[in-house]
Amino acid sequence: EVQLVESGGDLVQPGGSLRLSCAASGFTFSVYAMTWVRQAPGKGLEWVSTINSGDGSTSYVDSVKGRFTISRDNAVNTLYLQMNSLKPEDTAVYYCTKPIYPVCYGSNCPYDYWGQGTQVTVST
């Protein structure tokens, strides 16, 4: 059974940092690209970032480039999202997702599993 468990969300002031984690199980994590998506209050899902399995190449939505860093540790089947210089508009529930296909790029990663999400709130 595929399981994705996110953690690390919190209330943080603008300009602050958070590191999200996603513990994966039930599939061969190391061969799959992985993605983060988010859903802000009252809005639809937004793709945030993708990391590939082979070369570890990464891609980001323009609004987080230079502030967020996606990474993975295949030894412990965990995906990360380091978020710096947080802004109020980053407030959302963040989900990690497992793509349907092992190889995908950018936002073109249809997924079949996602976790329960972790809440990130950026506010004074």
Image (cartoon, grey):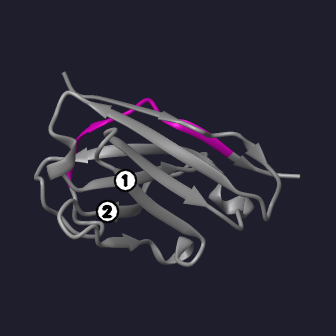
Quadrant hosting residue 93: top right
Sequence order check, earlier mark of 2 and 1: 2
Viewer-nearest residue: 123 or 26: 26
Q: Secondary structure at mark 2?
A: strand
* Distance in Å between CA atoms under marks 2 and 1: 8 Å
Left or right side of 91 for 98: left
Measuring from the top left, give residue 84's x and y in whole percent: 66, 64
The extreme top residue here reads 1
Measuring from the top left, give residue 82's x and y in whole percent: 56, 58
Viewer-nearest residue: 35 or 112: 35
Residue 56, labelled with which disc?
A: none
Q: Are marks 2 and 1 in contact (CB under 8 Å)?
A: yes
Left or right side of 6 for 1: left
Measuring from the top left, give residue 74's x and y in whole percent: 28, 47
Q: Secondary structure at mark 1?
A: strand
Residue 51, labelled with which disc?
A: 2
Q: Badge 1 is on which residue? A: 72
Amino acid under label 2?
Answer: Ile
For the point 46% across and 50% down, the residue is: 80
**Number of other residues with Cα within 10 Å of mark 1, as a class: few under 14, some 14 to 19, many 20 or more:** many
Measuring from the top left, give residue 67's x and y in whole percent: 60, 71
